[in-house]
Amino acid sequence: MSYKSVILSDYPLAYYPLDDMTTVDSLLDFNDILSQFDTYQELLDGFSSYSNIYGDVAYDHSGCENDSVYIGDPESNLLPVVVGNSRSTKISSTNSIQYTINRNYIAKQTNSQFGTTYSSDNDFTLEGWFYPQISTNNLTTLIGDSSNDVGLFYQKGNIIFKADSETLEYTLPYTNKAFHIAATYTQSKISIYIDGVLEVDKDLSGFKFTNTSMQLATGPTQNASDYFLVNSIGIYRYALSSNQIAYHYQSGKGLSALEIAAPENGEVFQIFDDNVSSVFRYSYPADKPWSNFMTTGLYYNQINNYIEMQKSTGSQSVVLEDYIIIPSLTADSSKIEWEGNNGVSVETSVNGTTYVSCVNGQAIPQYKLGSFSTTNKLYIRITLSTTDASRYLPKLKYFMISFYNDQRVYSSNGPANITTMDGVTGVSDANISFGINKSDILLRDYRNGVRTVTNSSFYLNTETLVKTLEFFYTPSALTTSSLVSSTSNGGAASNFSWSNLGAISKTNISAIYVNGVNKTSETNISNVFKDDQLHHVVIVYSQAISVKIEFNHNLSGSVSALYQYIALYQDAFNSTQALNHYSLWMNRDVKTISDNSTYSISIAEDEAEYFDNVWLLVQNS
């Protein structure tokens, strides 16, 4: 069952997918439109009938007709956050959504409200998917009324549920991913669920709202540098059960990489620590329990097995120190990783005096490729800190160090492997790292995939003749860099790279599809990728490549980037296959219309983005 069907089966008062570029009205979705056309000409004629695909209306799909409105012009041509959606909506300081909830379950105008002094006895639920990229400390409205202090908010990594004078907060341990968030209100309790799990609740007694009205909104952010992506807002006039919320979260997950690649004989890399060969690994709480670190200012959650800063007042910090003797082994690289980038910092030393800050998920500074210490000692200093211990409570769920020799990860269903490019001319930094989680791609979890730092790169080693590469790509910037290249050793020489001015260079590439759209004719990288955003990429080669395929390698430099779910195919994909795979990852249906006649269509440049991924017109000769 689709995510939308699951939500609608629980009778929301309003449901907003927030991907309205593929929505014509509240009753008719794109598949309904497409099913009306039997021929290619009818499809083209349909453009005139449905040219008003994108507007300022945030359509309610619940059937209650609580259509709402976009404020500003939110960017909407980004990959969705939840499967089944066409794309996500980007909320910023100038773009937001204002909700109008004035119709009941039979779509009739009503004065009945929730979350007001007249309706304190009415239970309700607020639910949605959010990807926060908010670095400032301002309070940001996820779905709520900031003037009346009702709804869901985000601040400094805290998810906050406000019910007038009552406030409930949960500090996210890790913020660099998307979340499914639900908050429920009853007269006796308020609760916050994160990714389907009840994280915190609070009993109420004799509670009553004081506000006489409520105007729900999503956004804006309070700072121009902050933004968040949003999908699938649900509003309910009752409190969803914990089972319903858990089911909603699970229904938002897509297919696995193997399910998509294997049917077409693809070899796929899922790229997480379980299939990386390490020579030594040490972790908390597996090798040393959290109870060993208990000290003043810390709370140990025995049920969920993590430590957390103890609730108090004011600015607080707690420092944990440990010392590890690394066994004599053959190793050349390492990684340090912990769950808790929100208020947790880590430093390491080899002498117990000079400490260096660590980057979560990257090499231990003293044990990197090309500068690997021979001391066999590691001093660790972990600091949990907060500016307000009454609200922001850093958590540490796990901490891990890993040592590797000839760092290598194998594909999930074949002999191909990924290695560093240590010692290769022009590679100034050969350090890469592999994530620890096998997560759903649309969650944008930074802890999955192979991560490169600035000017680092990696080999994909294969004896297979590869005609198509598929992967997900998140560049940190669009300055000089390379995507994929290969030499003529074992296959044709190939290249896709760009200069500091964005000019694209490509060799032996017959087609490149990004997010289901053919970008082969683009000459500037800014028209292909967006910095810090997730992209689905399919590259089709004119002649097969093989042996050592280079990712992110450019003699002129390359940006730090994240590569996820890389797949190799021996066959050359056509446009339909590329779109099919994109749609499978997004969990969307694909419909194809065939016609032997010749047609043409012209779309102005400023209109074309509205039809990306909505109408794919393919003329086969």
Image (cartoon, grey):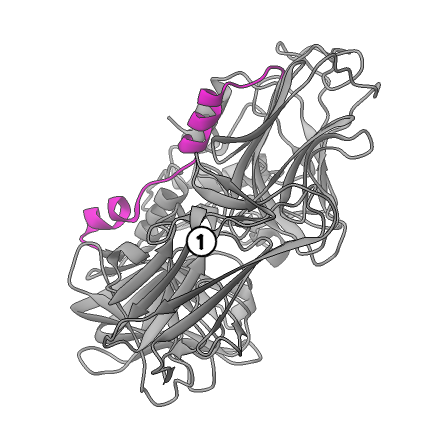
Foreground residue among 462 and 61: 462
* Residue in the picture at 55% in, 76% down: 479
Image side of residue 498 versus residue 103, left or right: left
* Residue in the picture at 57% in, 21% down: 62
Residues packed near mark 1 inside 10 Å, few (<14), some (14 to 19) or many (20 plus):
many
Q: Which quarter of the picture shows residue 537?
A: bottom left
Task: Please state the horizontal and vertical placement of residue 395, each as a whole percent of the image.
Answer: 54, 47
* Residue in the picture at 67% in, 26% down: 67
Amino acid at circle 1: Asn
> Is residue 311 inside the magenta stretch?
no
Q: Is residue 214 above or below residue 491?
A: above
Q: Is residue 262 above or below residue 215?
A: below
Placement of the N terminus among the 4 image quadrants: top left
Image side of residue 617 versus residue 407, left or right: right
Residue underneath mark 1: 515
Task: Please state the horizontal and vertical placement of residue 89, each as a whole percent of the image.
Answer: 60, 44
> Is residue 239 inside the magenta stretch?
yes
Q: Which quarter of the picture shows residue 279?
A: bottom left
Magenta span: 237-266
